[in-house]
Image (cartoon, rainbow, N blue to C red):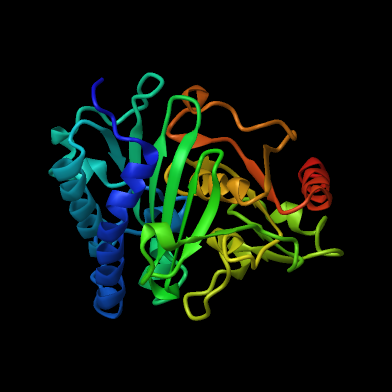
């Protein structure tokens, strides 16, 4: 392990490339080709795959190999990428040997439907915890980033990395997001919150909020059945740096990354206040 770049350097260097990738994804969205679905028969959202997923990943891989060929890299479409073999590894390393991850189009199902709520998410992971996350929303003219212990920041797509402004998530909108498989929890929350239950609310014709709306301060809480390193757990990390409480379903801190399987953390609660967190805890206990 030599000359591993800092998380800040990784995010700031790669932001312009993510902006270009996002502009490409936005430009071709209305003409996008649908590729054969991935083999996730129980989850149409995870199964969705487009030309943009593969093209964005290839583009970011080229940038990484040009600037930081020494880093570990795991891209969501690594099995279909011609570049995977050029990276040193695709898994977590020892402390300080960072793994960069990429979800080239987070929300591919929404993207294919023509909705704006999709993102490009790039992460820097150490053995135990996220060190940095950059999430870019091409159709909403925004990007968000967080560095461990330094807070969360928001900018427009015209802003340089240094111009992004620190932000905090507040409990303004009494809306809670539920990920797939959590419909039984909804009833325990409906007396206090507007509940967006993805399994019920999803529509190919009308955009509904998804978890990334937490960063836009449009949700006061969220419950995820699991938190994949490349997307849900990454956005939860940004939310935590923006002041949210993030725990597992029993109220304990999320486990260290190296103790997790299949690049994902267990079910997560994300809350903008202690009151909301207690409500979410009670809801999951009511199942």
Foreground pick, 252 / 187: 252
Can residue 246 be spotted in the picture? Answer: yes
At which x and y percent is residue 142? 44, 68
Q: Is residue 21 left or right of residue 221?
A: left
**203 relative to 159 in the view: left or right:** right
Q: Position of residue 157 (x, y in %)?
A: 37, 70
Residue at horizontal 57%, vertical 72%?
208
- Quarter where residue 35 is shown: bottom left
Q: Quadrant of residue 202?
A: bottom right
Q: State the residue at coordinates (19%, 52%).
A: 58
Q: Please, is residue 53 above or below residue 278 in the view?
A: below
Q: Nearer the viewer, residue 218 or 53?
A: 218
Of residue 240 and residue 52, the one placed in the foreground of this image is 240
Q: Looking at the image, which residue is at 75% across and 61% down?
A: 171
In the rendered image, residue 167, in percent from the top left (x then y), is placed at 59, 59
Q: From the viewer's side, name the closer residue of 192 and 94.
A: 94
Give the position of the C terminus as an image quadrant: top right
Is residue 107 shown to the viewer in this render? Answer: no
Residue 128's x, y, as percent? 49, 26
User: Which corner quadrant holds the N terminus?
Assistant: top left
Q: Is residue 79 left or right of residue 66?
A: right
Q: Is residue 250 left or right of residue 213?
A: right
The structure residue drawn at horizontal position 47% and vertical position 50%, both measured from the top left corner, is 42
């Amino acid at each position: 392990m030599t000359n591993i770049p800092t998380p800040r350097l990784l995010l700031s260097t790669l932001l312009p490339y993510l902006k270009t990738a996002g502009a490409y994804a936005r430009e071709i969205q209305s003409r996008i080709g649908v590729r054969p679905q991935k083999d996730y028969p129980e989850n149409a959202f995870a199964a969705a795959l487009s030309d943009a997923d593969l093209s964005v990943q290839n583009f970011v891989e080229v940038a990484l190999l040009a600037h930081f060929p020494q880093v570990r890299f795991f891209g969501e479409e690594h099995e279909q990428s011609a570049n995977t073999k050029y990276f040193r590894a695709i898994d977590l390393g020892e402390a300080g040997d960072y793994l960069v991850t990429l979800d080239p189009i987070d929300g591919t199902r929404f993207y294919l439907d023509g909705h704006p709520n999709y993102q490009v998410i790039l992460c820097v992971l150490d053995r135990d915890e996220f060190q940095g996350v950059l999430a870019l929303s091409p159709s909403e003219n925004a990007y968000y980033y967080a560095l461990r212990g330094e807070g969360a920041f928001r900018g427009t797509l015209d802003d340089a990395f240094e111009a992004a402004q620190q932000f905090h998530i507040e409990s303004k909108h009494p809306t809670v997001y539920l990920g797939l498989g959590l419909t039984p929890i909804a009833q325990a929350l409906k007396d206090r919150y507007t509940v967006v239950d993805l399994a019920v609310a999803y529509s190919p014709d009308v955009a509904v909020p998804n978890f990334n709306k937490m960063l836009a301060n449009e949700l006061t809480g969220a419950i995820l059945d699991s938190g994949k390193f490349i997307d849900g757990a990454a956005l939860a990390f940004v939310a935590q740096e923006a002041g949210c409480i993030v725990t597992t379903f029993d109220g304990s801190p999320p486990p260290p990354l190296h103790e997790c399987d299949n690049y994902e953390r267990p079910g997560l609660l994300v809350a903008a206040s202690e009151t909301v967190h207690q409500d979410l805890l009670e809801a999951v206990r009511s199942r």
